[in-house]
Amino acid sequence: MDDLYEQLKTELVRHESLTEEEWEFIKAKFSYKAIVKSDFLLKQGQMCHSLSFVCTGLLRTYSLNEGGSEVTTHFGYNDSFVVSFPSFRNQHPSFENIRALTDSQLLVIEYKDVQDLFKHLPKWESIYRKVIEEAYACMEERNYILQMLPAGKRYELLIQNAHPVILQKAQLGYIASYLGITQETLSRIRKRLTQITF
């Protein structure tokens, strides 16, 4: 268990240095949660009460479009955070689902404890802001890629930049919806790239 908390500490101090006392105060706010493959961390319509740090595993955030198709918007993997941020921030029902694609281990902090850290630990505000800024920058980059680049280039960038576990563990259909293309289109792109490689 200690090694999981060390993972979290490593991620947090990447944004802001912490004394041992500050770290222990933060650590006490996080609790361990195991989630098995295919289980939901959050379902559409539920309130998102927690922010989760992924220690091991892979989770998918997705919504349903008007046609009832699933649209993947985010993958949560080792050393990253998963949350339905609009629901978490505003404490209203989520329009997103978060589901485990593999058995996963998380460290979870509740909304009320996030607010408590804001009140009692100034450095937490800096850490939290930087985590959110990083997530927003990734979202903006993804929006640009979806709107401005052709399908083949989107997949090439995913291969270059994505965490390996996404390509290893996520179903092709999930990756395709994340890239804004059909699974058939993704299969053609993968076949073309394989032919070029060999």
Image (tube, rainbow, N blue to C red):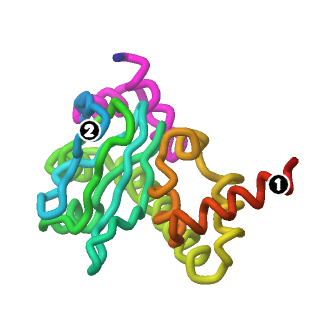
Q: For the point 40% across and 24% down, which residue is it?
A: 4
Foreground mark, 1 or 2?
1
Q: Nearer the viewer, residue 111 or 19?
A: 111
Which residue lies under the disc numbered 1? 195
Q: Nearer the viewer, residue 105 or 91?
A: 105
Rounded to the nearest angstrom, the CA distance separating label 1 from label 2 is: 44 Å
Tell whether 98 sits left or right of 49. Answer: right
Q: For the point 65% across and 67% down, which residue is it?
A: 154
Q: For the point 26% across and 29% down, which residue is it?
A: 34
Tell whether 129 sits left or right of 33. Answer: right
Which residue lies under the disc numbered 2? 108
Q: Main secondary structure of the magenta part?
A: helix
Q: Earlier in the sequence, mark 1 or mark 2?
A: 2
Type of amino acid at the residue the image marks with label 1: Gln
Q: Which mark is residue 24?
A: none
Question: Does the image show residue 80?
Answer: yes
Q: Position of residue 79 (x, y in %)?
A: 47, 38
Type of amino acid at the residue the image marks with label 2: Val
In what element is the residue under mark 1? helix
Q: Position of residue 71 (x, y in %)?
A: 38, 67
Q: For the point 44% across and 35% down, which residue is it?
A: 18
Quarter of the image where the N terminus is located = top left
Say if the magenta span includes residue 115: no
Say if the magenta span includes residue 11: yes
Magenta-highlighted residues: 2-29
